[in-house]
Image (cartoon, rainbow, N blue to C red):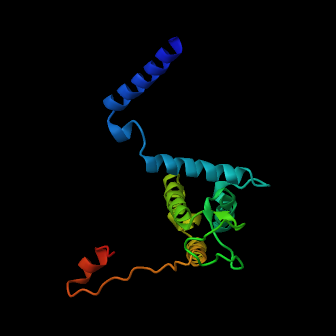
Amino acid sequence: MSGERGKDLAQGSNEDHLQSSPGAAASPSRYESQKRRDWNTFGQYLKNQRPPVALSQCNCNHVLEFLRYLDQFGKTKVHLQGCMFYGQPEPPAPCTCPLRQAWGSLDALIGRLRAAYEENGGPPETNPFASSAIRVYLREVRDCQAKARGIPYKKKKKKPSSKGDDESSSAMHF
């Protein structure tokens, strides 16, 4: 019974803390927490390299290697070109094609790491997460995954507008 009481007290004190604290100041947002976890994971990845890589020596090649390393933990089935289900949005049976990180997950990860780099004192002009090589890699992953699923990615085009350019360029079109 004392075990249950301890659990109840822990939950109660946690709830009290959440109610009495001013939200964002007491506990970081989900985005901020994820950004910190991603930053720590990337830092650990660099430390585990042989030889270890200092953050100041990190470049876009290290970031690309990190993204490829993460593929082994992916959950998205990406059919290979020789697979009989290549290009089928909903394959009727399982296959041996690899699981990869989804493009959207990688894109979001790079966005968080790009912000974390600068928040941790990295100069924007040398941000390895903002490199054109990273953008090219992400575009290739996106296109490859879209073709493998048979759903080509098509960027939404802005509709021409008779109004001023400022209004049409800031509006999102779906």
With 50 as the anchor, is 107 left or right in this view?
left
Most extreme residue toward the top, as rendered? 2
Task: Determine which quarter of the picture holds residue 101.
Answer: bottom right
Task: Determine which quarter of the picture holds residue 156.
Answer: bottom left
With 167 as the anchor, is 70 left or right in this view?
right
Instruction: Tell me the residue at 44%/79% (across/down).
Output: 155
Q: Residue 127: in sight, yes or no?
A: no
Instruction: Tell me the residue at 69%/54% (across/down).
Output: 46
Task: Determine which quarter of the picture holds residue 139.
Answer: bottom right
Most extreme residue toward the right, as rendered? 50
With 38 as the anchor, is 47 left or right in this view?
right
Instruction: Tell me the residue at 21%/88% (across/down).
Output: 162
- Pick the front one: 110 or 160: 160
User: Where does the image place residue 113, in percent across and percent down from the top left?
Assistant: 54, 58
Considering only vertical position in the picture, is 86 above or below 100?
below
- Pick the front one: 95 or 20: 95
Q: Residue 117: in sight, yes or no?
A: yes
With 75 as the anchor, is 160 left or right in this view?
left
Instruction: Tell me the residue at 72%/66% (across/down).
Output: 96
User: Where does the image place residue 25, in percent across and percent down from the top left?
Assistant: 37, 39
In the picture, the quarter occupied by the C terminus is: bottom left
User: Where does the image place residue 95, in percent across and percent down from the top left?
Assistant: 69, 67
